[in-house]
Image: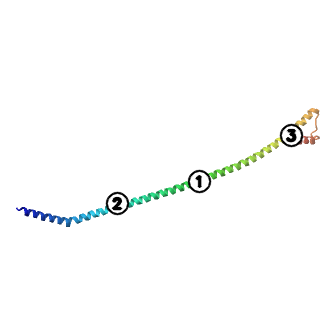
Amino acid sequence: MNLNLTLIAQALAFAALIWLIASKIWPPLLAAIEERQKKIAEGLAAADHAQKNLAQAEEQVAGELKAARAKANEIIDHAHQRANQIVDAAKAEALLEAARLKAATQGEIEAATTRAREDLRRQVSSLAVAGAEKLLRREIDANAHKALLDELAAEI
């Protein structure tokens, strides 16, 4: 066997193998690699887009929460104002009722005082008549001295 012939045959076989790989195997492998790189790039772009959408959604949620909190605080403030108005109205109504009750009680006190004075006048006039009877040791005619008793009652 000739060494040169073996080397030439191996070189031809190697060249055929390189041509076969370059023409038949290498293009589909490059296409698969490029397709995979394209899918990875699209996936990364989609992830970036999703990340941006998530950030925008979080900003929107934060804005909505801020608006909701502001609205809730406004409602709470309005409720406090209304409660204060109700309390003030109740206080005013209670003060009016107290004044009305005070006036009614004052009227009752004045009426009771007037009745007590009248009773006291009658008792004083009776005591005066009784004292005069005892002093004079005789009976006083009540009908005859009625004008005198009325005058004494009016003076007292």
Quadrant in the picture for residue 106: top right
Q: Amino acid at mark 2?
A: Leu
Q: Residue at x 77, y 45 (%)?
A: 108
**Who comes first in sequence, dot 3 or dot 1?**
1
Q: Residue at x 58, y 53 (%)?
A: 77
Within 10 Å of disc 2 (Cα), the crowding (few <14, some 14-19, many 20+) is: few
Q: Position of residue 123 (x, y in %)?
A: 86, 38
Q: Amino acid at mark 3?
A: Arg
Q: How many marks?
A: 3
Q: Residue at x 36, y 61 (%)?
A: 46
Q: Which mark is residue 122?
A: 3
**Who comes first in sequence, dot 3 or dot 2?**
2
Q: Nearer the viewer, mark 2 or mark 1?
A: 2
| Residue identified by numbered label 1 | 79
Q: Position of residue 118 (x, y in %)?
A: 84, 42
Within 10 Å of disc 1 (Cα), the crowding (few <14, some 14-19, many 20+) is: few
Q: CA distance from mark 3 to mark 1?
A: 63 Å
Q: Which mark is residue 35?
A: none
Q: Amino acid at mark 1?
A: Ala
**Label 1 SS:** helix
Q: Which mark is residue 44?
A: 2
Q: Residue at x 54, y 55 (%)?
A: 72
**Label 2 SS:** helix
